[in-house]
Amino acid sequence: MLSGTPQAVRLDSVTKIYGSADRRGRDVRALDTVSVAIPPGTFTAVMGPSGSGKSTFLHCAAGLDSLTSGACWIGGIALSGMNETQLTKLRRKHVGFVFQAYNLVPSLTVRDNIVLPLRLSGERVDRRWLEEVLARVGLTGKADTRPSQLSGG
Ligand SMILES: Nc1ncnc2c1ncn2[C@@H]1O[C@H](COP(=O)(O)OP(=O)(O)O)[C@@H](O)[C@H]1O
Ligand SMILES: [Mg+2]
């Protein structure tokens, strides 16, 4: 970065082509030289019709999928050249996902799902902060149930 706080996420000329030998022989150019800078502390919505590349964009911007060309940074850290282990650690520490299908661990309680990334990285759980986070999202009374026991879950 030239100066100051790095962008939360930055994409520079990102192209993602899904190769095809096994899919009717056609390449799909899901992202075509996409450049975007997302400042820290902001909200961004990605909108577009089905098949327009939203999921591909999110997967590339989060270090879940590789780029065909271009470059991507998370918090000023370049993803290019990182191996799977390095990407896993970066995601665990710096990226939060809320998937459409949630992808929670059904055998763990709500509380244990929340602290799972900390446990995996061997970090201490700040109990007070955990209670605060649970309270803020209205889960205090449900922290010790399993996700499937939540209404609508
Ligand atoms: N794993 C994949 N292999 C091949 N083509 C894919 C793959 N994932 C997505 N695509 C294609 O890339 C394009 C963008 O898909 P996607 O990013 O899922 O769009 P959206 O999330 O906006 O619906 C679509 O044409 C889709 O068929
Ligand atoms: Mg999608």
Image (cartoon, rainbow, N blue to C red):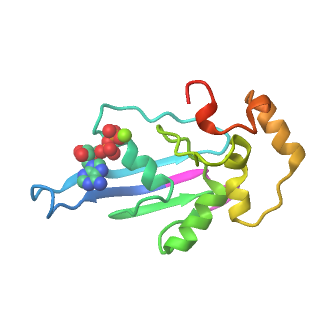
> Would residue 117 be visible to someone looking at this image?
yes
Task: Decide if residue 16 is on the left or right side of residue 87.
Answer: left
From the viewer's perspective, is residue 3 above or below residue 110? below
Percent position (x, y) of residue 97?
A: 56, 46
Instruction: State left or right for residue 23 relative to residue 38.
Output: left
Residue at 75% across, 37% down: 143
Q: Main secondary structure of the magenta part?
A: loop
State the residue at coordinates (73%, 51%).
115
- Horizontally, residue 50 falls left or right of residue 47, namely left
- Front-lying residue, 4 or 16: 16
Is residue 76 visible in this depiction of the protein? no
Q: Which residues are magenta?
A: 1-10
Magenta-colored stretch includes residue 149: no
Q: Is residue 23 left or right of residue 90?
A: left
Q: Residue lying furthest top in this view?
A: 151
Point out residue 63 in the picture as x, y percentages from the top left corner. 49, 59
Looking at the rendering, in which quadrant would you find the C terminus? top right
* Residue name at image x 29 percent, y 34 percent: 50
Front residue of 16/24: it is 24
Residue 115, placed above or below residue 134? below
Of the 4 image quadrants, the one containing the N terminus is bottom right
Residue 128 coordinates in the image, percent (x, y): 90, 44
111 versus 95 height, above or below: above
In which image quadrant can residue 110 be found?
A: top right
Q: Where does the image place residue 81, in percent across and percent down from the top left?
A: 48, 75
Question: Which one is in front, 118 or 147?
Answer: 147
